[in-house]
Amino acid sequence: MPELPDVARFKQYADRTALHHRIEKAKAEAGKMLKDVSPSTLERRLRGHAFTQTRRHGKYLFLRLDDGSWLCLHFGMTGELAYFDESEAPPDYTRLLLKFDNHHRLAYISRRKLGRIALADDPDEFAADRGLGPDALSVDARRFRELAQGRTSTLKAWLMDQSLMAGIGNVYADEILFHAGILPRRKLDDLDKKDLDRLHRTMRRVLKTAVEKQADPEKMPKSWLLPRRRKGADCPRCKGRVEKSTVSSRSTYYCPACQH
DNA sequence: CTCCATGTTTAGAA
DNA sequence: CTTCTAAACATGGA
């Protein structure tokens, strides 16, 4: 689930629920999800503080504490947030649990433990250390073309490369290329300036629409591939069928009739 | 039991 | 240096 639009939803969710409540207690599960911080240190650094604001960069969510430090969350393939009353049991697979002073709790949930939890002094520095490129929604047409300069990889691999642009994953790379009418396997050096500008506009439109629709497949326009990521499903825009193949070592869905 | 899964990292090969 | 592939991570769902 967690690509740029999903993490944008988590940010809105955190803004609505988790800001300005003192954290009375934090409980972190030990394990590899914690990056460069022990459970006890993380718990101590959160306890007694409140979140004051949030930021998103690519697939990362940052929550600022009132001492100026930031909690950094990456959601892997199965991560999400849940806010609930203290009378309810924490969800299964809760890896970090925050108990606020308003009798509510915030859980960071991750079934497969592929996400990451860290502390940082500054989100931009953190993103740079992780080798992340600019957030995909901050990239303008000129920057987009520059990122393509001299590259020869497949379009899909390029769109998903977090060191070039951060935020696009397997699902939205397919969605963008579907709307652009380009096969995911096509090579970057096949595209001219006009193609790149069109692809840039398509990327922005797809990501912005997905953020508006809170990354909910049910709410996406009828013309979207997202709810039909199954081999043999009806193409949403022609009489053809959705095909599945492997591109960039990932399952890839596309319409051979609409995309060239 | 087998295969697959919205991510990232790493090793090795071309 | 760039690109691609496979494997590993950890775990459940179909």
Image (spheres, coloured by chain):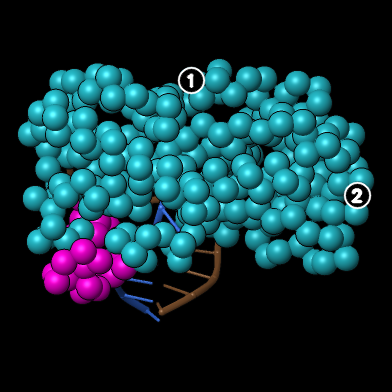
Chain colours: A cyan, B blue, C brown
Residue B11: image location, x then y, percent: 31, 35
Q: Is residue A242 magenta?
A: yes
The residues bearing labels 1 and 2 have C-alpha atoms spaced at a distance of 35 Å
Eyeballing the image, is A164 above or below A167? above
Residue nearer the viewer, A247 or A114: A247
Residue A260: image location, x then y, percent: 9, 50
Write down the chain letter for disc 1: A
Crowding near the residue tagged with mark 1, few <14, some 14–19, many ≥20 C-alpha atoms within 10 Å? few
**Does dot 1 land on a helix, a strand or a loop?**
helix
Quarter residue A141 falls in:
top left
Q: Please report the bounds of the magenta region as a residue range.
A: A228-253
Secondary structure, magenta segment, majority class: loop
Respond whether the residues carrying marks 1 and 2 are from the same subunit: yes
Q: Is residue A135 magenta?
A: no
Residue A194 appears in the figure: yes
Q: Which mark is residue A102?
A: 2
Q: Which residue is mark 1?
A: A128
Residue nearer the viewer, A146 or A218: A218
Eyeballing the image, is A137 above or below A107? above
Q: Amino acid at mark 1?
A: Ala
**Does dot 2 land on a helix, a strand or a loop?**
loop
Q: Residue at x 40, y 32 (%)?
A: A136
Residue A147 appears in the figure: no
Q: Amino acid at mark 2?
A: Asn
